[in-house]
Every structure is written in structure tokens, then in C-alpha cells.
Image: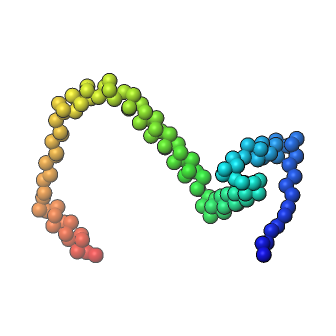
Amino acid sequence: MKRIFTTTVRLNLDDADDRRAFEHLQKLDRKQYRSYSKAIVAAVNAYFERQEQLAADPYLETREKEDAFLARIEQTIRSSLQSCAPLGAGNFLQLLQGAQPAAAPAVQTDNEDISAALDFADSF
């Protein structure tokens, strides 16, 4: 036996939010949602699950915005490099080939410093 709950959704087309909801329902992709009920169930579940996530992690929305912002920055840099790569890559590679690595600074070990460090470690 099926357990079905029936309710009515009343949309006031003079209200902007209600009108937008109505327009979304009118443009409904029938391949994805077979009925208004399926679309409304998906929307209600998504909304309340999102509210629960935000209540559990108040910084979730901020992190998502930061991730989206970083993705846009990466995409911009990537597309800029791809558009400039054929023109400036040869000059850049020539600069890299002529570069010499910097000499590592010489490290002097002082026996007095080592013994002081060991004494300090032994004090624990």
C-alpha cells in the first residue's frame, strides 16, 4: 500500500519570489523531473540539507566562495599563459637556459655551538 501525502502549493504571481518559482516550474526539464512533485521534493531536500550543512559548519559558504574565486584566478592565469605561450616561451626558455644557480652559502660548524646545543637538549 502506497503512503501518499497530498498538499497544495499556492503561488502568488504578484510576489517576485513566487513568480520566479512558478517560472522555474514552467521551464522544468521533463527528462530530469517527471512532475512538479519530483522537482519540489528535490528543491526542498536540497534547501534543508544545505541549511543543516551551514548550521554544522558556519564557514562552509566562505570556503566555497574562496574555492570558486581561486578557481577563477587559476583559469584566468592558465588562459593568459596559453595565449602568451607561443609568443614569449622562446625568450623565457633562453633566459632560463642562461641562468646559473646561486651558490649555497657555506655552513660552518662550530664544535662549541654543537656542544652547547647538546647540553641544552640533555637538560630536559
Residue that appears at 51% across and 48% down: 67
Residue that appears at 18% across and 39% down: 102
Is the residue 8 above or below the residue 85 in the image? below
Side of 84 relative to 68 (left or right): left
Q: Position of residue 41 (x, y in %)?
A: 73, 59
Q: Position of residue 39 (x, y in %)?
A: 72, 54
Side of 31 relative to 106 (left or right): right
Q: For residue 49, what is the image quadrant?
A: bottom right
Q: For residue 40, what is the image quadrant?
A: bottom right
Side of 42 relative to 106 (left or right): right
Q: Is residue 123 visible?
A: yes
Instruction: Give the residue furthest to the top.
Output: 87
Q: Is residue 51 visible?
A: no
Side of 103 relative to 93 (left or right): left
Tally the numbered discs. Answer: 0
Q: Nearer the viewer, residue 74 or 112?
A: 74
Q: Position of residue 27 (x, y in %)?
A: 73, 43
Quadrant, the N terminus? bottom right
Residue that appears at 44% across and 40% down: 74
Is the residue 62 above or below the residue 103 in the image? below
Residue that appears at 13% across and 57% down: 109
Quadrant, the C terminus? bottom left
Q: Nearer the viewer, residue 93 or 45?
A: 45
